[in-house]
Image: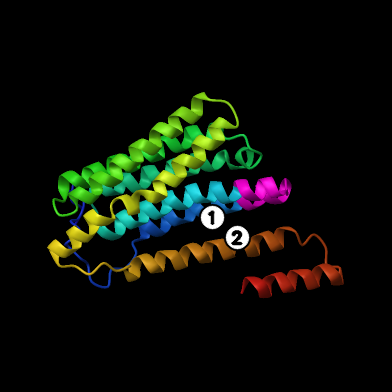
Amino acid sequence: MFNILGKPRNITEVIRNRKISWLELFYDLIFAVVIERITDGVVEHFSAESMGNSFIIFGWFFWSWHETSGYFDNHGNDSTLNIGIINIQMILTGIAAIYIPEAIQTHYQHLLLAFLPIELMLIFVWYAISRFDVAHGPASRIWARTYMVSFVFLLAGVFVRPPFNFIAFIVALIINYCAVFFANSALKREYTTIKMPYILKDSLIERYGLMTMIALGEMISGLYARLDNLKPIRLFDFIMGIVLAA
């Protein structure tokens, strides 16, 4: 039942054999756009530099997706708060994807700006959890504080020129990924206290599989887009591309 005054589900409220919701699947589809824009940007301006930029850009979007997916795996429900979070994240991700092609060419200023509200949203998410879920509070606060440090670097990157904005972008990304290491001891105490095994849930593994299918779908779509004629050599390349994707 839709709960107007709902709050995030506590981490101790484990849903056995949880199935991914339609809203989570819809959220994942925005990353088809992200992957398409990254790959098209690399193909159009192929170089070692653009390849390196693509890894960094994908790292940011993957971090955003993984954090939101992990949050919903542990705390998701049909409350207004959670439905709002996933919809806002989807919109912010779509806006950030607009600036991928220029970032591939090392123009990071707009993408830095686009990730500021995403970082703020995840700071809000983990501070909210620290208020609603007492058991998960200590680790959640570490996550939120870590992302606040990352936010400062992102904000600084907006106001400095290249290559310093690029350096700030990378440092902020590294800090985001290090949050789990900073919170490691708090997580151990938490799971010991609530007597829960620390495992990767089947529903989250399924999300990883779906993300992989999206990437493979984009690969096949790209193969079709470049099949402009049916010369034997091009047809052979196309068939081999499909085989490699499979």
Compare residues 100 and 82 and report the one nearer the observer: 100
In the rendered image, the quadrant that contains the C terminus is: bottom right
Residue 144 to residue 181: above or below: above
Residue 55 position within the rendered picture, expressed as x and y whole percent measured from the top left: 57, 51
- The residue sitting at 35% across, 49% down in the picture is 179
Q: Type of residue at label 1?
A: Ala
Q: Is residue 10 left or right of residue 147?
A: left
Residue 76 seen by the camera: no
In the rendered image, the quadrant that contains the N terminus is: bottom left
Q: Is residue 222 left or right of residue 197?
A: right
Compare residues 141 and 237 and report the one nearer the observer: 141
Residue 126, by quadrant, is: top left
Colouring rule applied to residues:
rainbow
Q: Earlier in the sequence, mark 2 or mark 1?
A: 1
Which disc, if any, is residue 218?
A: 2
Residue 116, by quadrant, is: top left
Q: Is residue 28 magenta?
A: no
Q: Type of residue at label 2?
A: Glu
Q: Is residue 198 left or right of residue 92?
A: left
Residue 223 position within the rendered picture, expressed as x and y whole percent measured from the top left: 70, 63
Residue wearing tag 1: 32
Q: Secondary structure at mark 1?
A: helix
Residue 103 to residue 157: above or below: below
Residue 19 position within the rendered picture, expressed as x and y whole percent measured from the top left: 31, 68
Residue 18 seen by the camera: yes
Contact check, label 2 and label 1, Cβ < 8 Å: yes
Residues drawn in magenta: 37-53
- The residue sitting at 20% across, 65% down in the picture is 14
- The residue sitting at 52% across, 66% down in the picture is 213
Q: Residues within 10 Å of mark 2 (few under 14, many from 20)?
A: some
Q: Residues within 10 Å of mark 1 (few under 14, many from 20)?
A: some
- The residue sitting at 39% across, 32% down in the picture is 152
